[in-house]
Image (tube, grey):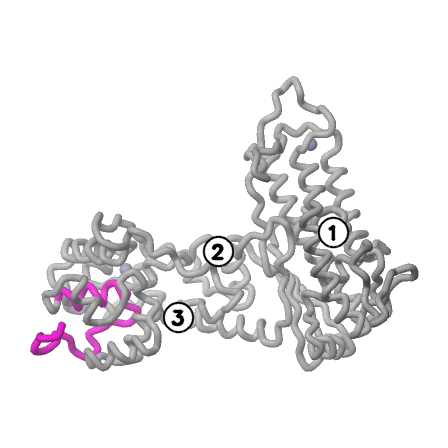
Amino acid sequence: MAGYPSVNWWPRNLRPYESALSFVARFCALNGVPARAGTAFLGVEPRHLGFASDDDVARVSSLLGEDPARLADVLQHALDFRQCGTYAPPAAYSQGPSVRYCAACAQQGYHSYLHEVPWLTKCPIHLTALTTVPANRTGNIGERRLGAFKRLMQGHCAAWPHFAPDGFPTREPGALLTLAAWVRDACDASKRMQAGELWRSEAGTHRGAVTMTQALGQLHTLTPLPTELEPLLADRGGAWVVHQARFPRAVSRELARLGERGLRFDSLFAFYKDSGDTSEGSPAWYCQAVQQQIRQRHGTCGCRWERVKAGFGEFCWIQIPPDELGEASRQCPFEVALQDLELDWGSRGRALPSRLAQQEMYRFLKESHAMRDAGVLSYKEGAQVSPDGYLYLMQRVWPCCEWIWDSPLLGLFRTAARWEIDSEHRAITRWLDDIEAGSPPSHRQDPVYCVRLRSDEQGASLLHWRSADHRGRG
Ligand SMILES: [Zn+2]
Ligand SMILES: [Zn+2]
């Protein structure tokens, strides 16, 4: 906008929690320039509004003389769960080709980025439902949203691009203050939970993503949601509970010793799981007990679904014709669940298809050197070992190795594995419940990050998050 004598903007023209969309649209309207020229002048990309860098904030602040703190709120969506790290709700909402807004706010010329976050279903100022309108048809997504937004605001507020007199936020703060305080407290609590975290579980064939229900349920457990906010939140789901098991200081000392040798918990744990421990209390032993429960629930097969190969390594589910019900050796949902458990927790090297097994073996062989040097595994009698003490490749390497059973980490590994299997069992139970209730077998999406390891001054502790629903059902 070089050549313009001055810019029509004034300090604190931005309102608290105003959306970047609203800011850019009002800037363009106040200066009588099209969206493309306005965004080029401000140097913000309309497709990525709300995710500006600190440098962008400083630059726009000096261009417009706007309060940098307020600009940071608007351009970076300050009221947000980003600080929650792995406890945050699913990542940034898609800036899809639509605009979500509150009609009461729009009548005051106001639009907030909170109107478009996926974890809220109502306007936090008016506590009313939000409306979605499609974006314009031409331009990139940012320009299309800007176009739709301008039309929308002009239709609701005669004063726009100015605010209606006495509009937000001079009145009606609604639940905003409470909401801002809760988000801040939830972020602080999440940070405390993640302090000293060494590992979190991502195990399983059907690893999903953190869902809105899981994230909001966990945050609610860490920082109880004020009652007045309950109607605002999307998909709060049921309560989540967290259990903790503490381990003696010898465990955290051992983890630190191995960490100094470059051996992280996840590779040690993976080795332990691969090592073929089937003794009482081992993951394989516990997996068998869970498989037994699933078999008992199954009884004689009366399943109406069968999984069949669909080519290219894919599978699909088909309905079994009524006259073929009860025939043995089908890939029914129960059989598939039992196989999944076997793949995840049975003797891994044997259960995997051969190509994967080969890759796993190379990985293991490489790491076994470091583990042997660190004294956490030994070679069994009969293993072929090179003069410098390493396993030869031309043999089945897994059966050659043995975890050192007096390692202080054994109890930690067994508890972590047991909890991971519990999480998988609960996901399987929900999946089978849904199928029995009449749903076709969907792709299972097991929750992630349900088991976490942290270390603090007192030693190491494991955390197990689980939904309080389905208690007693797996
Ligand atoms: Zn509103
Ligand atoms: Zn069956």
Callout 1: CB less than 8 Å from ligand 2: no
The front one of 288 and 168 is 288
Q: Residues within 10 Å of mark 3 (few under 14, many from 20)?
A: some
Secondary structure under badge 2?
helix
Q: Residues within 10 Å of mark 1 (few under 14, many from 20)?
A: some
Q: Position of residue 457 (x, y in %)?
A: 68, 82
Q: Is residue 141 left or right of residue 362?
A: left
Q: Position of residue 143 (x, y in %)?
A: 23, 57
**What stretch of residues is rendered in magenta?**
1-29
Quadrant where the N terminus is found in the figure: bottom left
Instruction: Please name the predominant secondary structure of the magenta segment in the image.
Output: loop
Measured Cα–Cα span from mark 3 to mark 1 = 47 Å
Q: Earlier in the sequence, mark 2 or mark 1?
A: 2
Q: Earlier in the sequence, mark 3 or mark 1?
A: 3
Secondary structure under badge 1?
helix
Amino acid tagged 3:
Ala
Q: Tell me whether the residue at label 2 lies in contact with that at label 3, contact meaning CB atoms closer than 8 angstroms.
A: no
Q: Position of residue 294 (x, y in %)?
A: 73, 41
Which residue is farthest top?
323
Q: Which mark is residue 348?
A: 1
Q: Residue at x 80, y 70 (%)?
A: 372
Question: Of tags 2 and 1, which is closer to the observer?
Answer: 1
The front one of 27 and 178 is 27
Q: Residue at x 61, y 44 (%)?
A: 430
Q: What residue is disc 3 on? A: 180
Q: What residue is disc 2 on? A: 212
Q: Which mark is residue 145?
A: none
The front one of 386 and 30 is 386
